Image (cartoon, rainbow, N blue to C red):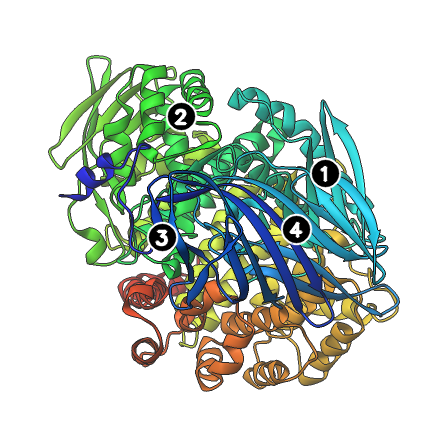
């Protein structure tokens, strides 16, 4: 059976079990779980009673458990024999006699460990303002880590209700998905929190947190919206709380289903993770603090925008993911792609000056295509066959390509029919599980258009379509062109022929066109004509709504360069991105990209300069460690310095968010390239921090600190280390830790690595520091990690282990690195878990091939002095 047939055969009524999925002869109806954490010993104990439905008579019950010591189990009050398969993360109960069809009661008791990194029940260590240590507890269960908290059917299709109770030290705040129904004092200076029963939901959405925290709330209609944070900073949640209060009624209306919980807490944890920044637990959304709290003394404008989009993303999950959940992790994109698209849609509605759709053209679109156009691509709907593979599904294709494909379908169907289809889907499948085709069915029913065929071509195969435009001419008052569909790739594997059905809008710039446009489905390599009324410059993929690259023949491209400033912002950004990528893939000379970029003048839109700055940074990275690095850095300084002079170091009254973001980018890029003025400013500002922790203006704090770290001398690195040790603000401290790994001097990178052997920083901070060293010196970081593998794996989250160390080497330009990565993988990583290995090796190969391909054009460009 081919892939398409298999996917079509998987329906809501009963998919075949994937490898590793639990049997369905016994399913949970409700859990009553009690846990007793001991934050000091990092241990906890638990007990549960689960009401189950036996569908077929059986003497065995199998469910998930990981890193739990099962003390005992009973079924309908009778002891059951317990066996544990640690490798499969399963526990099987052998019943004294066969259980009959119907409802039964299963009880279990266990002990477990509190982790130091974000999986299962974990600890977040930080310091108070007075420097004293404090520990917060929280849970992180997505994807397969609820089983580290309690034995359960830890798969998304096994939805159930949860009643949770937990012991917490007296005076601490505890919180979960539902409000507490009672808080009572118990022996040992503790209090027992009992929480209300949740709606039917998947296990990965369960949440528990506790600590020396405070909560602030306001009402949004019938829902209480809360911010929970460490004490003293809850007011920094006002921005997020205000955004959430406006987003809730918008989402209620858009999805056509009211938010079903009585409260929605937004919880700030002062830590970090290698895997995630926020998690959509139903009614108790968890964020690491930098993703939720806005500190006006330290945060940049991009930080503020990031907070908004993350809140919008996680809130969208309360419907797409929580209310309606994918049946299995193959369809994770139903959660993440839709939430990513919705965050952009909400941002456009409430913050139109951000130009969110245009920003996505150079952000999410380019990010998705960067991976999708390589041998490391995979379909949006991908087969997940093991627990280890689940973590690999959380990548740019799932998120960013998913977002782009959903946006393309909305543009094709129209906003109103698309929303009607989403409402049908929500109403029909609320509190249940789905596969992707069920969404396409509802969109087709609402729009009357053939969604499935188009959608399948983008979700069941990887890769990037290439729309070619040639022979543009005007005659008889009409403009005509020949168009065809191929494939864009950055390596040979990604250039293998494939067919998509690409909905493309063609439009005109200037001439007598008068805004003429036409829509077409472009599919296959055979050229087909398109025509528009009037004469002018033809633009394909108008507004960059479709997920495709566009390749113009020379005359059509020359016309676009000539009329560049007359195109819409999205189309200017799309042309910049396509031209650069087409040169990387060998479809056209890099000189065309330089021609287009030359049309971006000093006073151009900030997003155009973001694109140019990003491309110049990419070129410099391609030739890092070669004779071309220094002249490329000098060219970047010459090109970008006048733009910074126009924007200035200080914000101006009434300036737009894109301008503020460009300032950050320019200061950071120029500082990284060694601009003497930016480096001198950074040194002056950092010298003031010992006496005033907020001496750096917040608008440029992040890039000024990164400039200082990049250009640091040995003495200046010691200054940075002293600031790190003295810092009590956990977000600022996490940032300082990462900066310690950012020096250009390899000797200072080694000193940063030496910190990983000490207790100076926490386990999550160690992972962040090692990644920072790899960003600057991938060869040193990879070699060190391999030599110290046990130490490194001790501070990694389990879901990241198969990809973290090999990913450290992905930025290397050393010809020996691919062999080293392969040898490491052969020794330590199972063949089925090598998605990270493939990405790292592909990244290196693509970068080398592109650098070799464009080197003559880069040399000519540098020699020309433009």
Q: Earlier in the sequence, mark 3 or mark 4?
A: 3
Residue 159 in the image: above or below residue 68: above
Residue on which the image places disc 3: 59
Give the mark nearest the N terminus, 2 or 4: 4
Report, in whole angstroms, how far the alpha carbon at label 3 lies from the one at label 4.
33 Å
State which quarter of the image contains the C terminus: bottom left
Q: Please report the residue visible at 57 percent of the width from the left and 85 percent of the height from the top.
A: 750
Disc 3 to disc 1, how far (Cα)? 38 Å
Q: Which percent across, then down, holds residue 517?
A: 33, 19
In the picture of the structure, the residue carrying the numbered disc 1 is 179
The percent position of residue 819, horizontal first and vertical second, equals 29, 79
Mark 4 secondary-structure assignment: strand
Toward which corner of the image does residue 810 lie, by quadrant? Answer: bottom left
Q: At numbered mark 3, what does the secondary structure look like: helix, strand or loop?
A: strand
Picture coordinates of residue 129 (x, y %)? 86, 63
Query: Relative to the observer, which residue lies in front, 575 or 841?
Result: 841
Task: State yes or no: discs 2 and 4 in contact (Cβ < 8 Å).
Answer: no
Task: Label 1: state its secondary structure.
Answer: loop
């Amino acid at each position: 059976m081919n892939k398409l047939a298999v996917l079509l055969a998987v329906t809501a009524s009963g998919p075949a079990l994937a490898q590793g999925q639990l049997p369905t002869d016994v399913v949970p109806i409700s859990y009553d779980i009690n846990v007793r954490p001991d934050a000091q010993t990092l241990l906890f104990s638990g007990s549960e009673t689960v009401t189950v439905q036996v569908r077929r008579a059986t003497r065995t019950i199998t469910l998930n458990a990981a890193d739990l010591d099962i003390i005992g189990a009973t079924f309908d009050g009778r002891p059951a024999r317990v066996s544990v398969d640690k490798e499969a993360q399963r526990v099987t109960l052998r019943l004294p006699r066969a259980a009959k069809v119907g409802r039964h009661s299963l009880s279990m008791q266990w002990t477990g460990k509190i982790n130091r990194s974000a999986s299962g029940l974990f600890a977040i260590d930080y310091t108070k303002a007075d420097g004293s240590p404090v520990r917060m507890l929280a849970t992180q269960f997505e994807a397969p880590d609820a089983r580290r908290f309690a034995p359960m059917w830890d798969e998304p299709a096994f939805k159930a209700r949860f009643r949770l109770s937990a012991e917490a030290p007296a005076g601490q705040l505890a919180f979960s998905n539902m409000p507490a129904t009672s808080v009572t004092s118990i022996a040992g200076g503790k209090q027992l929190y009992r929480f209300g029963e949740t709606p039917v939901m998947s296990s990965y959405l369960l949440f528990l947190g506790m600590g020396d925290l405070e909560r602030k709330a306001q009402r949004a209609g019938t829902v209480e919206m809360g911010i929970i944070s460490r004490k003293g900073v809850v007011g920094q949640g006002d921005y997020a709380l205000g955004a959430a209060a406006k987003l809730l009624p918008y989402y209620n209306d858009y999805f056509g289903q009211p938010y079903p919980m009585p409260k929605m807490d937004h919880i700030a944890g002062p830590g970090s993770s290698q895997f995630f920044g926020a998690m959509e637990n139903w009614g108790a959304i968890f964020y690491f603090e930098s993703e939720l709290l806005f500190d006006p003394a330290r945060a940049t404008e991009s930080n503020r925008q990031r907070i908004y989009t993350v809140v919008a993303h996680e809130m969208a999950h309360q419907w797409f993911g929580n209310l309606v959940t994918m049946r299995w992790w193959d369809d994770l994109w139903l959660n993440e792609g839709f939430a990513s698209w919705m965050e952009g849609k909400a941002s456009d509605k409430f913050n139109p000056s951000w130009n969110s759709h245009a920003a996505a053209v150079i952000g999410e679109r380019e990010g998705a295509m960067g991976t999708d156009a390589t041998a490391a691509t995979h379909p949006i709907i991908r087969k997940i066959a093991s627990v280890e593979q689940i973590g690999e599904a959380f990548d740019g294709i799932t998120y960013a390509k998913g977002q782009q494909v959903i946006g393309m379908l909305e543009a094709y169907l129209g906003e109103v029919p698309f929303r009607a289809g989403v409402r049908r889907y929500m109403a029909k499948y609320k509190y249940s599980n789905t596969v992707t085709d069920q969404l396409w069915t509802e969109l087709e029913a609402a729009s009357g258009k053939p969604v499935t065929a188009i959608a399948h071509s983008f979700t069941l195969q990887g890769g990037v379509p290439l729309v070619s435009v040639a022979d543009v001419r005007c005659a008889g008052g009409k403009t005509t062109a020949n168009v065809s569909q191929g494939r864009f790739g950055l390596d040979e594997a990604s250039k293998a022929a494939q067919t998509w059905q690409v909905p493309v809008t063609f439009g005109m710039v200037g001439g007598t066109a008068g805004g003429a446009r036409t829509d077409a489905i472009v599919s296959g390599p055979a050229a087909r004509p398109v025509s528009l009324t009037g004469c002018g410059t033809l633009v394909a993929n108008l507004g960059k709504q479709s997920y495709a690259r566009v390749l113009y023949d020379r005359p059509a491209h020359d016309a676009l360069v000539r009329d560049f400033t007359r195109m819409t912002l999205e189309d200017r950004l799309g042309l910049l991105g396509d031209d650069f990528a087409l040169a990387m893939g060998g479809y056209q000379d890099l000189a065309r990209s330089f021609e287009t970029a030359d049309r971006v003048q000093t006073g151009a839109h900030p997003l155009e300069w973001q694109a140019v700055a990003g491309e110049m940074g990419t070129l410099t990275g391609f030739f890092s460690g070669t004779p071309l690095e220094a002249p490329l850095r000098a060219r970047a300084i010459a090109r970008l310095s006048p733009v910074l002079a126009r924007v200035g170091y200080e914000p101006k009254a009434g300036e737009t968010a894109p301008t503020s973001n460009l300032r950050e980018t320019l200061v950071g890029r120029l500082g990284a390239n060694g601009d003497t003025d930016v480096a001198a400013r950074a040194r002056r500002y950092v010298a003031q921090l010992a006496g005033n922790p907020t001496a750096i203006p917040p608008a440029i704090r992040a890039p000024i600190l990164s400039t200082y770290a990049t250009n640091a001398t040995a003495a200046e690195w010691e200054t940075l280390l002293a600031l790190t040790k003295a810092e009590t603000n956990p977000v600022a401290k996490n940032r300082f830790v990462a900066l310690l790994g950012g020096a250009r001097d390899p000797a200072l990178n080694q000193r940063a690595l030496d910190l990983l052997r000490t207790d100076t920083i926490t386990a999550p901070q160690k992972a962040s520091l090692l990644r920072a060293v790899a960003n600057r010196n991938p060869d040193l970081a990879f070699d060190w990690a391999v030599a110290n593998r046990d130490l490194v794996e001790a501070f990694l989250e389990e879901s990241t282990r198969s990809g973290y160390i090999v990913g450290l080497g992905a930025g290397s330009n050393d010809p020996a690195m691919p062999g080293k990565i392969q040898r490491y993988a052969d020794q330590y990583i199972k063949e089925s878990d090598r998605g990270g290995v493939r990405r790292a090796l592909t990244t290196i190969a693509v970068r080398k091939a592109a650098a070799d391909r464009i080197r003559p054009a880069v040399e000519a460009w540098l020699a020309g002095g433009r």
